[in-house]
Amino acid sequence: RDIGSHSWRKGAQTKLNCGSTGGPTAAAACIRGGHSMGTNRDLYIMGEAASDQVCGRLLAGLPIHLAEFAVSYVDFISIDAADSLAGSVSQADQQQRQAELDAKVDDALESIFGKERLEANAQIRPLLRYGLASVLYHYKRGAYDELLKDSTSKVLPDSSPLRQSPVFSSPAIRELAEYAIISMPWDGNRRYFKEASGLPPHVIMFAYQKQLMESVEAIPQRIEQILDRRQMMSNMSVEDIAELIARGPRFQGIANDIRAVRESVAALAANGVRQGRTGQTANAAPAQNFRLLRQYRHASDGKERRVPPNWKFPNLSLQLTYQYWHCGNENEHLPPMKYLSNSDVNFLGKRAGTTLSEIRRVME
């Protein structure tokens, strides 16, 4: 009873002003919260990006007393294991890979929000890109399957409609999770991100100290490598031989073949998402959907059905229902709803067959 709708606003202002001795100025907190500072201050003190972003970083829960306060946003960057196989990648190759990845991300956004809607609101596409990257980054780390404190419920319950959305049900979109990364000032990925703002001076010093510590810790390993390379009679070490092989044309060809196969598989998986959305092949299911057709034995009556005993009609929007109707849910191994019959859903109650017929009438 002591917590109301206004408590979030009070808590945020308390954290900005009193949560740390290294926080933003009172003027920055007032401007961020939309509070008046008096007639003269409101006239002469204007908000700037640096003070506004330090407020945003604090309210996001980042630790202002650690170097990790300088973490970047999440974005899709084309850095994968193929780079280590083929050796260093030229800037032109990196730009080409990034362009191909950006095209896959655009396809994913269109399958989630619709191409026409994105074209009508093109200014929010970067925000949706960062949002999708953030969701997939936490999905890759298993954050949504963790249990709540003192509870057996997951952070994102299995019954949540978000679990049925393309973000979780489409293999082509989930494969983008490996490219969703963050960066710290002391790692080598910082050059792929925009320049950070809203960093207090002491956080920048923490970041430089962190970079210096990692450089010092890497000295013994570097000395061992140098000593290993300078063997008697100038023989080549195992590391030298492996490096020459990895940089050779044959290994580079293998890396290119692996990358081509990976892109082909991703394109085939994404084909089902695009076809289901555009309705071009509504009468012919994509090949991968046949793998989802299986039988589940129900202990209540001993019959076999195409859905598990805990299945229920999804509570989704019209767009996601159309997606589920034609493509199913690859992640949960559920077939497209258009293949279900009344005998597959009659365990849900007397109106189950009627509900399925009503959905079929709308979808077809």
Image: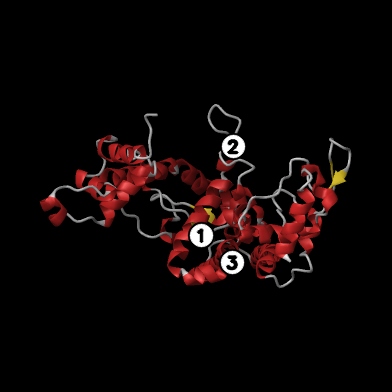
Q: Amino acid at mark 3?
A: Asp
Q: Which residue is mark 1?
A: 77
Q: Position of residue 223 (x, y in %)?
A: 47, 44
Asked whether 338 or 69 is in front, the reply is 338
Is disc 1 placed on a helix, strand or loop? loop
Q: Residue furthest top?
A: 150
**If the image is split into quadrants, where does the N terminus sit?**
top left
**If the image is split into quadrants, where does the C terminus sit?**
bottom right
Q: Position of residue 173 (x, y in %)?
A: 61, 58
Q: Amino acid at mark 2?
A: Lys
Q: Position of residue 293 (x, y in %)?
A: 82, 54
Asked whether 47 or 88 is in front, the reply is 47
Neighbour class for label 1 at 10 Å: few (<14), some, many (≥20)? many
Q: Residue furthest right?
A: 302
The residue under the point 38% across, 32% down is 3
Q: Is residue 116 visible?
A: yes
Label 3 – label 2 distance at C-alpha:
29 Å
Q: Is residue 13 left or right of residue 356?
A: left
Label 3 – label 1 distance at C-alpha:
16 Å
